[in-house]
Image (cartoon, grey):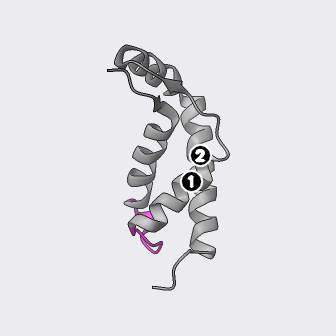
């Protein structure tokens, strides 16, 4: 059964997990709520790339994983991390 997948979303979630566990972002909240807010903010500023088959997913993933695209995605995620760090949606 086909499913609808946003490959940009998959890449963003993977990079958020990677970045938040790096030394530079240890002081930022790592809760699920903040990770989702970071992802939502970043994805709202990046173009989606939807596919419906696993073969198309692999092709899209390979297309999107260029150094230029990853640099743009990382830049948006980093901006989102700082924005959410300044204005988290919880008071914990």
Residue with the most extreme right position:
45
Q: Which residue is mark 1?
A: 40
Q: Position of residue 20 (x, y in %)?
A: 42, 60
Q: Is residue 63 left or right of residue 55?
A: right
Q: Main secondary structure of the magenta part?
A: loop
Residue with the most extreme front position:
1
Q: Which residue range is magenta in the image?
A: 22-31
Q: Residue at x 51, y 20 (%)?
A: 63
Find out whether residue 38 is within the magenta segment.
no
Q: Position of residue 66 (x, y in %)?
A: 53, 25
Q: Is residue 68 above or below residue 56?
A: below
Foreground residue among 65 and 7: 7
Tally of numbered tags: 2
Disc 1 + disc 2, Cβ < 8 Å = yes
Q: Position of residue 15 (x, y in %)?
A: 44, 46
Q: Secondary structure at mark 1?
A: helix
Foreground residue among 76 and 1: 1
Q: Which residue is mark 2?
A: 43
Q: Residue at x 44, y 54 (%)?
A: 19
């Amino acid at each position: 059964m086909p499913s609808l997948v946003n490959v940009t979303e998959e890449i963003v979630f993977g990079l958020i997990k990677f970045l938040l566990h790096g030394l530079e972002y240890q002081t930022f909240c790592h809760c699920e709520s903040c990770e989702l807010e970071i992802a939502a903010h970043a994805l709202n500023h990046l173009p989606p790339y939807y596919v419906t088959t696993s073969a198309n997913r692999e092709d899209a993933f390979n297309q999107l994983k260029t150094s230029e695209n990853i640099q743009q995605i990382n830049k948006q995620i980093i901006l989102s991390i700082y924005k959410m760090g300044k204005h988290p949606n919880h008071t914990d």
